[in-house]
Image (tube, grey):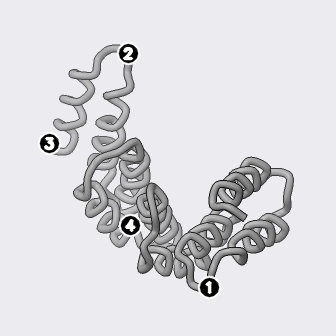
């Protein structure tokens, strides 16, 4: 088995998630994860994702944390932070989610920035900080608009600084 082959099989499993019931899908991902060495952070990450995607953030949370304590390669590290923050938000801990995502925004920038901000906006809403949440969401959307980017960025800033 090559890393490339394993990644291809994982991607194929995720592409077919809707063909499985929740237990069967978790078993498919669990089988693929079992092909990696014991304690491998990618195995923990993929299992966490499978639990999260099938409605079990309570079981995903410790696996995300385990993945993040290892050296999770590439964008999986950032995805693990985003998904952990989403899980803890879903488990009723929005401030922990906000803290994770705020720290993540300070770590640098990449193509997942708007995903970080999207989950942050949800967590802010759950924390009762709706104006700030709308500010974060509008600010993230502003860059993608065909027009009005400058205006929307200004409105986002005004929402955060009433």
Q: Looking at the picture, does residue 36 appear above or below residue 52?
A: below
For mark 2, give the secondary structure: loop
CB-based contact (under 8 Å), mark 3 and mark 4? no
Q: Nearer the viewer, mark 3 or mark 2?
A: 2
Mark 4 or mark 1: name the one nearer the start of the chain: 1
Q: How far apart are the two marked residues, 3 and 4, measured between alpha carbons? A: 24 Å
Q: How many marks?
A: 4
Q: Residue furthest top?
A: 147
For mark 4, give the secondary structure: helix
Q: Residue furthest bottom?
A: 38
Q: Nearer the viewer, mark 3 or mark 4?
A: 4
CB-based contact (under 8 Å), mark 2 and mark 4? no
Residue in the picture at 56% in, 78% down: 40
Residue in the picture at 41% in, 59% down: 78
Residue 4: mark in rendering? none
Residue 162: mark in rendering? 3
Within 10 angstroms of label 3, few (less than 14), some, or many (20 or more) residues?
few
> Residue 148 falls in which quadrant of the image?
top left
Residue 146: mark in rendering? 2
Q: Position of residue 87 (x, y in %)?
A: 52, 68
Q: Looking at the picture, does residue 22 appear above or below residue 113?
A: below
Residue in the picture at 40% in, 42% down: 111
Mark 3 or mark 2: name the one nearer the start of the chain: 2
Q: Residue furthest front?
A: 2
Q: Position of residue 15 (x, y in %)?
A: 73, 47
Q: Position of residue 17 (x, y in %)?
A: 77, 54
Q: Which residue is mark 1?
A: 38
Mark 3 or mark 4: name the one nearer the start of the chain: 4
CB-based contact (under 8 Å), mark 4 and mark 1? no
Q: Nearer the viewer, mark 1 or mark 2?
A: 1
Q: Which residue is mark 4?
A: 97
Q: How far apart are the two marked residues, 3 and 1, measured between alpha carbons? A: 51 Å
């Amino acid at each position: 088995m090559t890393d490339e082959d394993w990644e291809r099989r994982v991607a194929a499993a995720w592409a077919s998630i809707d063909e499985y019931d929740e237990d069967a899908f978790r078993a498919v991902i669990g089988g693929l994860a079992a092909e990696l060495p014991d304690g491998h952070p990618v195995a923990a990450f993929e299992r966490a994702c499978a639990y999260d995607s099938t409605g079990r953030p309570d079981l995903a949370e410790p696996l995300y944390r385990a993945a993040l304590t290892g050296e999770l390669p590439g964008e999986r590290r950032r995805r693990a932070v985003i998904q952990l923050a989403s899980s803890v938000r879903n488990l009723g801990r929005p401030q922990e989610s906000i803290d994770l995502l705020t720290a993540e925004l300070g770590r640098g920038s990449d193509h997942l920035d708007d995903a970080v901000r999207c989950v942050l906006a949800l967590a802010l809403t759950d924390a009762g900080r709706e104006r700030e949440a709308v500010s974060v969401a509008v600010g993230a959307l502003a860059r993608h608009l065909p027009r009005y980017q400058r205006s929307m960025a200004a409105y986002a800033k005004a929402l955060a600084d009433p």
